[in-house]
Image (cartoon, rainbow, N blue to C red):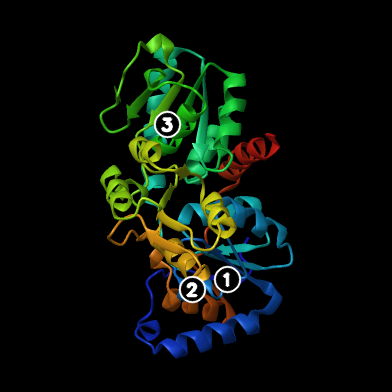
Amino acid sequence: MSILSPVAESVLPEKYRNLPHAEYDTRIAAAKSRLGNDLVIMGHHYQRDDVIRFADFTGDSLELARIAQQQTHAKYIVFCGVHFMAESADILTGDDQAVILPDMKAGCSMADMADLAELEEAWEVMQAELGDTIVPVTYVNSTAAIKSFVGRHGGTTCTSTNAKGVLEWAFKQKKRILFLPDQHLGRNTAYAMGIPLEQMAVWNQVSGEWEEVKGPQADWRVLLWKGHCSVHTKFTVDQIDRVRERDPETKVIVHPECTFEVVQASDYDGSTSYIIRQIREAPAGSKWAIGTEVNLVQRLANEHPEQHIQLLSQTMCPCLTMNRIDRPHLLWALESLVEGNIINQVSVDPETTRWSKTALDRMLAIR
């Protein structure tokens, strides 16, 4: 249900391009003030600093969606993140609230690697080969359509923080897990639980074939969708080796979306919230090389000058789609609301919402 008149146009108008930096800041602040309590702005940890400074709440994707759910007073949820995050917020918020993504081109390459039609075809093959032995689990970094499929088939969602607990729950349901869309989080989590690589196989959704098969099919327990994060797969073991050669005292901490080899070579691995917590609790003088999105690493370095913090890679590793949310698009979204128009509203249909919420609710019930 739209609150204001929706505007289909999703291309940034020329009048919002190339304004002075100070004008963007002044006008964003003014529009935010005029909208008052009707507006809540969510900012993902990977968001650029010049945008996240206007966020009312910051966090990871699911954390922000859950916070949005609590903002029952707000008519407008402006989500500075990527498309699947805004979908999750729309699923969890009320029908009388509008979720807005300032730039609809802010997608997620990982989420896009799991297509519903390909999943339905793969599911038929897996059911034919392995029978009714599989429960699907999807990372929250997936589209609402994928979450809905998982919900309909008795599965659930997970985050990088609770992936272990969710997999433990799933193994109590059935013998095997189909984990999508990020093969690396699935592999790293399962291996840390004691499941050997020989009991895992990768489904290539493009070729429609199994890959990385190391053991007999009868022994498979984890079926991994061939998806990945374009940022986290840029980190390598060679980068870790070079950091340690330069300074053996530097500790390496990476996100579990990194490859298996990188996670095994690091000193620590964990979710975005885990990385933030580790740095906040680390003593002055400690040295860190962090393998995750560069905006977050730079923010941590600025917040903790008493430590020596660097990006694991010597080259920039930004999330390019996340960086599509910039001040021009944020200003456009906010001033459109002030003028009585909703642009770039993300709206999930009722049936998809129903089953996606089922999958999310199952996760939230897992202890």
| Whether residue 347 can be seen here | no
Q: Left or right: where does residue 39 sit relative to residue 111?
A: right
Q: Residue at x 31, y 19 (%)?
A: 213
- Height in image: 338 above or below 88? below
Q: CA distance from mark 3 to mark 2?
A: 34 Å
Quarter of the picture containing the N terminus is bottom right
Q: Amino acid at mark 1?
A: Ala
User: Callout 3: helix, strand or loop?
Assistant: helix
Residue 265, above or below 168: below
Q: Nearer the viewer, residue 60 or 113?
A: 60
Q: Is residue 200 above or below residue 272?
A: above
**Callout 1 touching callout 2 (CB < 8 Å):** yes
The amino acid sitting under disc 3 is Arg
Circle 2 SS class: helix
Residue with the mark numbered 3: 187
Q: Residue 55 shows which numbered tag?
A: 1
- Front residue of 314/20: it is 314
Residue visible at 43% across and 13% down in the picture? 130
Q: Amino acid at mark 2?
A: Val
Identify the image quadrant of residue 89. Answer: bottom right
Where's residue 70, x and y in %?
A: 72, 58
In depth, the one of 123 and 52 nearer the eye is 52
Q: Exactly how many numbered labels are in the figure?
A: 3
Q: Position of residue 7 (x, y in %)?
A: 49, 71
Label 2 Cα neighbours within 10 Å, binned few <14 / some 14-19 / many ≥20:
many
10 sits left or right of 4 in the view: left
- Residue 225 picture location, percent across and down: 39, 32
At horizontal 49% and vertical 24% (from top left) the residue drawn is 177
Mark 1 lies on a secondary structure that is loop
Choose the circle earlier in sequence order: 3 or 2.
2
Question: Which residue is labeled 2 in the image?
Answer: 51
